[in-house]
Image: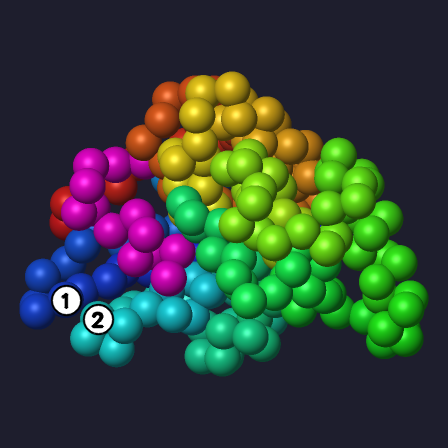
Amino acid sequence: MSPLIIEHVSLHIAGAGLFLPIDLRVSPGTVTSVVGPSGSGKSSLLSFICGTLSREFETHGRVVLGEDDVTQMAPEKRGIGILFQEPLLFPHLSVRGNLLFGLRSAGSRRERRRQVDAELESMGLSGYGPRDPATLSGGQKARVALLRVLLSKPRALLLDEPFSALDDANRQIVRQLVFEEVRRRGLPALLVTHDGGDVADAAGPVISLGVA
């Protein structure tokens, strides 16, 4: 995998800068934590990186993934996955349907279903394919959301407080699972969090955003 590189990025809205220009290199298989007070632009930075930032912002700098400058690419072309505080599973689809939506595979539908079921088993969710997402616990929903992102074969992963809605027990389990997958798959990952436990478990560099 390739590094995720943020080159002299700054964001402005209504003429005011959110934070001082950032230069950052996120190495494959590592989790870099982004911390700072509310309103400092942490989530806006992730939106800029994945290409979904509102047009009301004035932006400077660029995002490079490997050898590719993805700054002007459409979000779906960047190869960047993102996990949010809420799992955002499609309520009209089964667990398997949600995962098939994210799966990038040229195989037959039967082969893709087989792959999805194998991945569910690897997450400790064997037999959950036909389930309605509404019947899952918070921790189970978080695992399905993670798996859906991973099945899309991202080249980098953004984590926008994905553990904050979980209870203490599930929070520890899910964040360890996410960080293990980041390291196992060699993904560069950027984590926005207010939780010191997240930062400690990420065990990577820490970037603090202050008001510009």
Q: Amino acid at mark 1?
A: Ile
Label count reads 2
**Front one among 60 and 130:** 130
The residue beneath circle 1 is 13
**Front one among 5 and 90:** 90
Res. 68 visible in picture: yes
**Front one among 130 and 44:** 130
**Figure quadrant of residue 100:** bottom right
Mark closest to the chain's N terminus, 1 or 2: 1
**Front one among 83 and 47:** 83
In the rendered structure, does residue 89 fall within the stretch colored magenta? no
- Answer left or right for 77 relative to 121: left
**Residue occupying the point 66% across, 69% down:** 101
Residue 150 percent coordinates (x, y): 68, 53
Confirm or deny contact between disc 1 and disc 2 (CB under 8 A). Answer: yes
**Residue occupying the point 75% across, 69% down:** 104
**Residue occupying the point 39% across, 36% down:** 165
- Residue range of the region highlighted in magenta in the rendering: 35-47
Mark 1 is surrounded, within 10 Å at the Cα level, by few (under 14), some (14 to 19) or many (20 or more) other residues, namely few
The residue beneath circle 2 is 57
Mark 2 is surrounded, within 10 Å at the Cα level, by few (under 14), some (14 to 19) or many (20 or more) other residues, namely some
What is the image's colouring? rainbow
Secondary structure at badge 2 equals: strand
